[in-house]
Amino acid sequence: MDTAQSLNQIAITLYWVCLGAYSVYWLFGFTQWKLRFYVLLGIVLLHVVTMAIRGVSIGYFPLTNKFESFNAFAAATFIVLLIYTKTESHIYRMSFFGVGYVFLVAAMIFPKGLSYAPPLMLTIWYMLHVPLSFFCYALWVSASAAAVARYFTSGEKRPYDQIIDSGFQYGLITFSISMIFGGLWGYVAWGAYFLWDAKVVWSVIIWFFYATCLHLDYWPESRRFKPPMAIVGFVILIMTYVGTSFLIGSSHSFR
Amino acid sequence: MLAPVSLSAVLIVSDNKVKTIYNILKSQKLGILVGFSVTGLLIIGSLIMNYQPQYYEGLSGEDISFFFNHKKPIHAWFYLLFLACVIYGVNAFLCTLDSIIRKVRVGVKKIPLYGASLVHIGFVITLVAHLIGGLYSYTEPPVSIAEEWRDVGGAEMKVTDLKTSSYPNGMPKIIEVSVMVRKDGVEFPDTLGYNNPVLLQNGVLEILLRDYGWIASGVVMKVDDRVCKLKVNDTFSANGNQVRVADLYMPPQYRYPVLKLVSTTENDKITQPIFLPIGEENTKEIHGAKISFEDINSVPGALVSVKNNPSIPLTFVTIFFFSAGMILVVFRVVCRMVNT
């Protein structure tokens, strides 16, 4: 067995360890914030190291197939959750965590063998575009989790509104930067910064959607629609990220 | 009887109408409504394009002229989208202008507060750039290029070298095609690869790599004991008779390269072409000379397509505004976070 295969085997074993650790975190999620923060931080660090080993084994950023993509998205979700782990609401934290966990479990179902990056992926624009998109998706998932928690909370709702607002705002900033990188990649790879391709069209859809949501503040009567919009946004996000690969044909489909 | 109406009253009424239209067009409520309309129309369009693909054959890249050249009721979503984008563009422009004027009037001097306005300017320019690119960009059919100069969209290009690397499983990794480009009488070297197009005219003209490999440029033949290096359509002499290399290919009846030879001698009795497979064992006698097809000379080559998009300079302006605006917005957000 060569070095790449050996490293990949180590990475796969560690991925399973991470999945086990995240499964145990379902219990820690209900403990006091310091404990849950450090436990999650430890698991996330292990997850990042695992992805780095996988990256070394394939000689590139580990974002070349379904397994790696879902893993990276799950990791982005857990990293953003670390930022909001002080939030009191269990419903917010665990629904947010749950989304990442579902993607991690789904990732483990896909083939995990070595898969090298095709020449078109070998560009700095890809490495900037995709991870930023995942962090932005995670921020929007955070906003939708806050919206869900808001509906189940009878007390103070301001903290949730703040999470929704910051999710919309930081998510849109991150996604806009990601779109610029994606556009540059499209230009050097296909000669077009926009394509009538399902994934690209849905990326534009989600950008317009959240850009509009961000402006709801300028119409006072419409502010109350932000929480439902955060949940609708989650549906659009899932469609953009997963639906365009499994439900709609796209050149961006997972291989 | 109609009451007499003074000119100033008419002007006041029309002025009020203009003001009302202006206020509607610069309304943020309109922007929100149009924003959600664009979102909805794009969702509808995406689903129609996916489930009725037969109506969208030929639609590629950022092209929008397709929808105007093939007017169909099924494209209604696009026509509404186009209208919505026009309103969106006007709305964003007027809102931004209004916001900047108000900030300047009250003497806002903190540059980061203008970040959002810059992003909005970038957005408006994006819409204009996409309109220009969507209507006027085009891609020329792929051209194969090797050792000889070939015309590629107003420039000439030839391949000088090809370097490739591959993964342990044999999958291609890095492809680097060295080329010479000649434009307006000036020659310069460049490299072509995936994600590495040759850019001309400030990026408006883009030469993209589609495929690469070694291209047969000629053949090595043995005529009796004489070695001849020939290209397709070259002729050679066999006992004083001229024979032309008419073609080099792999016909279905053979599993290896074959030369098609045609005698060009006047009053020649050989009218049928002769097929000469590669290899000394396939030596044939033509006009009394023993002729064999020894080898193929190959040169590096590339299949390229030329994309012409006049909106590219405007796109770079967009990126500048977006980036500058985003930096200011991020700076403002960070400052706010630090202060709180």
Image: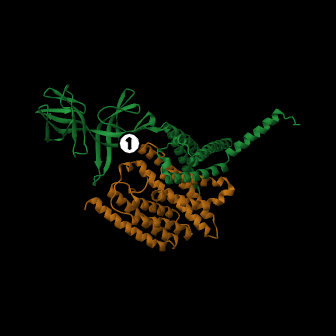
Q: Position of residue B337 (x, y in %)?
A: 57, 56
Chain corresponding to green in the figure: B
User: Measuring 40% from the left and 68% from the top, which residue is drawn there?
Assistant: A18
Residue kind at label 1, given as amino acid type: Asn
Total numbered badges shown on the rendered structure = 1
Q: Position of residue A13 (x, y in %)?
A: 34, 67
Q: Colour of chain A?
A: orange
Q: To which residue does mark 1 refer?
A: B196
What colour scheme does the image use?
Answer: by chain
User: What SS does tag 1 mark?
Assistant: loop
In this rendering, the answer to whether B75 lies above or below B9 is: below
Please state, as top left, top right, bottom left or bottom right, where the N terminus of chain B lies in the image: top right
Q: Position of residue B5 (x, y in %)?
A: 84, 35
Left or right of residue A144, residue A47 in this image: left
Left or right of residue B12, residue B265 in this image: left
**Pick the front one: B279 or A14:** B279
Please state, as top left, top right, bottom left or bottom right, where the C terminus of chain B lies in the image: bottom right
User: Measuring 52% from the left and 72% from the top, which residue is drawn there?
Assistant: A32
Label 1 lies in what chain?
Answer: B
